């Protein structure tokens, strides 16, 4: 059976197509489409008309490519930037009207549980009790436990994109005062987690998400071209001097640092602060980087027979309606333009 996952994020849509072999999702096709939703938010977080059009165009393209790739079923969801938008229902309605595909929304706790499953299957039982951390654009997910699924999971409002928008907008680079205020805010949030006892049972600390991967590369881990089976670590002591370097560099210079992509350069400083304070607050000297995360957790959950989270479903591909070639929405991807 060929399964697809459509992940609609703040800046990109990721399409992942896999063949099932036993209980391992084997990737056969992947595509990334730019949406730029985060740059098309109104005050208060609503997605503008231009942003909605770009989401519809990207999902339409993903449906076409998934059909060409022979997908049997698809799981499609929107991440925090749409999930938390005041006009979320309008975004979901626009996509469904154009494609027949209803984007689901996962809660932060559901994301944490699925990401934990992916890390467990990647690292195996030798990892013992695991603590996983995932820094997204809108939130940070944490989960811990010795089994297939975590005993405890939670989501914190410490996403790198949202912290950047809320604290680091007074200059490029931001002022020292803004950075200090952000660090104090993150530390206060982490202290609330550190006061609990459940995270102390972990034998292995794991970092997932692009933010952790980029921070590991920044601090000396092997580049991604070396493949997924190379052990990569993020050490807290190596991260500290990079916070100062990132804080003192404008966005364009950050994008030239090892492992930092241009579209993430603006939020990598906030991500580094979250990672550093989180590791410090939880007493973690280093994290092992796991290349599998939420998308793989979704696929594994399907292959292992779990019930989908409430409000999200696997959709047979033949139920989807694909607009014909030349549909006007394709222009938003082809030319990278949008209307007001």
Image: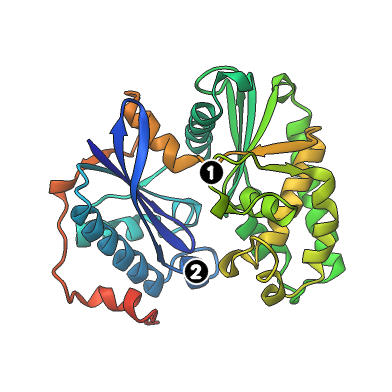
Q: Is residue 123 left or right of residue 172?
A: left
Residue wearing tag 1: 228
Q: How many marks?
A: 2
Q: Which mark is residue 197?
A: none
Within-10-Å neighbours for mark 2: few <14, some 14–19, many 20+:
many
Residue at x-position 65% and y-position 70%: 255
User: 282 and 223: which one is in front?
Assistant: 223
* Colour basis: rainbow
Q: What is the CA distance from the residue labelled 2 to the residue labelled 1?
A: 34 Å
Q: Position of residue 177 (x, y in %)?
A: 86, 66
In this rendering, the label closer to the viewer, 2 or 1: 1
Q: Residue at x 49, y 53 (%)?
A: 84
Percent position of residue 250, x then y: 74, 75
Frontmost residue, 5 versus 152: 5
- For image coordinates 81% across by 53% down, the residue present is 183
* SS assignment at label 2: loop
Left or right relative to 22: residue 122? right
Quadrant position of residue 200: top right
Q: Earlier in the sequence, mark 2 or mark 1?
A: 2
In-image side of 82 versus 22 (left or right) = right
Q: 208 above or below 247?
A: above
Instruction: Estimate the x, y position of residue 201 in percent, counting from the top left.
Output: 71, 19
> For mark 1, does the 10 Å Cα neighbourhood hold few (<14), some (14 to 19), or many (20 or more) residues?
some
Q: Is residue 100 visible?
A: no
Tell me the tag on residue 41: 2
**Image quadrant for the N terminus?**
top left
- Can residue 303 be seen in this snapshot? yes
């Amino acid at each position: 059976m060929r399964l697809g996952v459509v992940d609609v994020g703040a800046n990109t849509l990721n399409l992942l197509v896999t063949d099932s072999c036993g209980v391992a999702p084997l990737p056969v096709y992947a595509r990334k489409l730019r949406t730029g939703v985060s740059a098309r938010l109104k005050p208060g977080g609503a997605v503008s008309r231009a942003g909605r059009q770009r989401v519809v165009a990207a999902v339409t393209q993903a449906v076409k490519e998934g059909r060409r790739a022979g997908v049997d079923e698809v799981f499609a969801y929107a991440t925090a930037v749409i999930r938390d938008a005041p006009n979320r229902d309008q975004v979901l309605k626009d996509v469904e009207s154009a494609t027949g595909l209803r984007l689901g929304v996962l809660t932060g706790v559901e994301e944490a549980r699925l990401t934990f499953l992916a890390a467990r299957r990647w690292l195996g039982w030798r990892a013992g009790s695991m603590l996983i951390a995932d820094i997204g654009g809108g939130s940070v997910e944490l989960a811990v436990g010795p089994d297939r699924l975590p005993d405890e999971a939670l989501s914190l409002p410490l996403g790198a994109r949202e912290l950047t928008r809320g604290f680091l907008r007074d200059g490029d680079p931001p002022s020292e005062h803004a950075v200090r205020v952000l660090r104090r805010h993150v530390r206060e949030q982490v202290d609330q987690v550190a006061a609990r006892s459940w995270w102390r049972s972990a034998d292995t600390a794991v970092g997932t998400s692009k933010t952790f991967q980029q921070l590991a590369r920044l601090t000396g881990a092997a580049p991604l071209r070396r493949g997924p089976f190379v052990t990569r670590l993020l050490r807290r002591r190596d991260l500290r001097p990079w916070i100062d370097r990132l804080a003192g560099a404008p966005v364009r210079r950050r994008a030239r640092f090892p492992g930092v992509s241009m579209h993430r350069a603006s939020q990598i400083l906030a991500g580094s602060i979250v990672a550093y304070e989180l590791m410090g607050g939880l007493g973690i000297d280093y994290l092992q980087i796991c290349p599998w995360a939420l998308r793989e957790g979704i696929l594994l959950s399907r292959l292992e027979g779990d019930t989908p989270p409430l409000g999200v479903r696997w959709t047979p591909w033949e139920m989807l309606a694909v607009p014909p070639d030349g549909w006007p929405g394709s222009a938003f991807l082809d030319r990278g333009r949008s209307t007001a």
